[in-house]
Amino acid sequence: MNRTIAGIAMPDSAMARGATERVRATESALMFRHAQRAFLFGALTGYRENLVFDIELLYVGAMFHNVGLNTVHRGSSCRYEVDSANAARDFMREHKAAASAIDEVWLAVALHTTPGIPEHLAPLAALLAAGVQMDVRGACYDEFAPQQRDEIVEACPREAGFKKRILEEYARGMEFRPHTTFGTVNADVLDRWDPNYRRLNFCGLVLGSEWPN
């Protein structure tokens, strides 16, 4: 029987259960619960805005959106969002998901930290980004009823010091590949976390290029 949180029935298909098991086994409890809350806030946003979306795909995307930060990817030279999207794609292929569904989840996961784009794509991308941003930085906080927020946090608790701890999780997953943060919000994380980090500046790259004029 599906578990219901804040009026949202948690997906219980074989693929959804597999995603839960896979991510629970590979992520910290903090990041796993963050993924659950991101799904719930995203789903609530979709229903509030009367959007048509596949709740199972939203769940899988939410489960996998941060797995690129895990230690298994510490040798990667890709943005962690791409590693996360690739992991979701590989998992969905194992479950024989349709190619169109895989592509939709891949794009949603890859772009979930990119401001100004997901909301112009399919609802899945918009809702994954919205759910993540609500849980991480309280985006559209007041658009959720206090009872909804309380039910979600009761079922999927925010650990003490969550704000600082999630930034630490981000930093640990990116500190070995600082070049991937160029032009992203991830640069803000390393700028705060690593005293030796120096962010690339687009204007400096243009003005310092090999072109004579």
Image: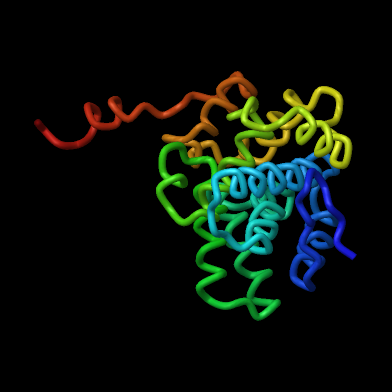
Residue at 55%, 70% in the rendered image: 101
Q: How many numbered marks, from 0 up?
A: 0
Query: Residue 92: where, in percent of width, then height?
Result: 65, 71
Q: Is residue 171 visible?
A: no
Residue occupying image coordinates x 67% and y 32%: 144
The quarter of the picture where residue 3 lies is bottom right
Left or right, residue 68 beside residue 106? right
Task: Give the percent coordinates (x, y) of residue 193.
Answer: 64, 23
Q: Residue furthest bottom?
A: 96
Identify the residue at image location x=62%, y=54%: 84
Q: Residue 134, located in which quarter of the rendered image?
A: top right
| Residue 205 location, quadrant | top left
Q: On the rendered structure, is 148 left or right of 83?
A: right
Tell me the quarter of the image containing the C terminus.
Answer: top left
Q: Nearer the viewer, residue 116 or 70?
A: 116
Q: What is the x, y in percent for residue 155?
A: 88, 41
Left or right of residue 79, residue 34 in this image: right
- Please provide percent x and percent y for residue 31: 77, 42
Say whether residue 207 is left or right of residue 168.
left
Q: 145 or 212: which is nearer to us?
A: 145
- Name which residue lies at 57% across and 78% down: 98
Q: How is the image coloured?
A: rainbow
Q: Is residue 153 above or below residue 117?
A: above
| Visible residue check, residue 211 | yes
Q: Please identify the quadrant where the N terminus is shown.
A: bottom right
In this view, the residue in front, 168 or 162, is 162
Q: Is residue 33 above or below residue 97?
A: above
